[in-house]
Amino acid sequence: MSFVVVNININYKRPSVLNDELMISVTLKNIGNKSAAVNQVITRKSDLKVVADADVTLQW
């Protein structure tokens, strides 16, 4: 199945630099017949600080 990102809202919390190891978690918020919404959180592994979070809407 293929999909298209139709909307994304990103909140940048703090900078990340080259060689930072990042963890990305994805949580399914809802799913419908033609679309789904997920929340993504990007965390810096060294100090567990959130670098950014995003709400993403996908459509197929």
Image: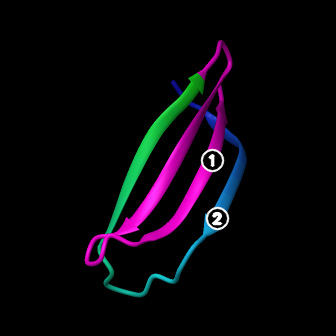
Q: Where is residue 16 in the image (x, y as percent from the top left)?
A: 45, 82
Residue at image mark 2:
11
- Identify whether 2 is placed above or below 51: above
Magenta span: 31-60
Amino acid of disc 2: Asn
Question: Residue 55 — which label?
Answer: 1
Tell which of 50 and 21 is nearer to you. 50
Magenta stretch: includes residue 45: yes
Question: Residue 35 — which label?
Answer: none
**Badge 2 element:** strand
Main secondary structure found in the magenta portion: strand
Amino acid of disc 1: Asp
CA distance for labels 2 and 1 = 9 Å
Residue at figure coordinates x 32%, y 70% from the top left: 48
Q: Relative to 43, is 9 on the left or the right?
A: right
- In terms of image quadrants, where is residue 7? top right
The disc, 2 or 1, on the residue closer to the chain's N-terminal end is: 2
- In terms of image quadrants, where is residue 36? top right
Magenta stretch: includes residue 18: no
Residue at figure coordinates x 29%, y 74% from the top left: 21
Q: Where is residue 17 in the image (x, y as percent from the top left)?
A: 42, 87
Q: Which residue lies furthest to the top in this view?
A: 33
Q: Where is residue 53 in the image (x, y as percent from the top left)?
A: 55, 59
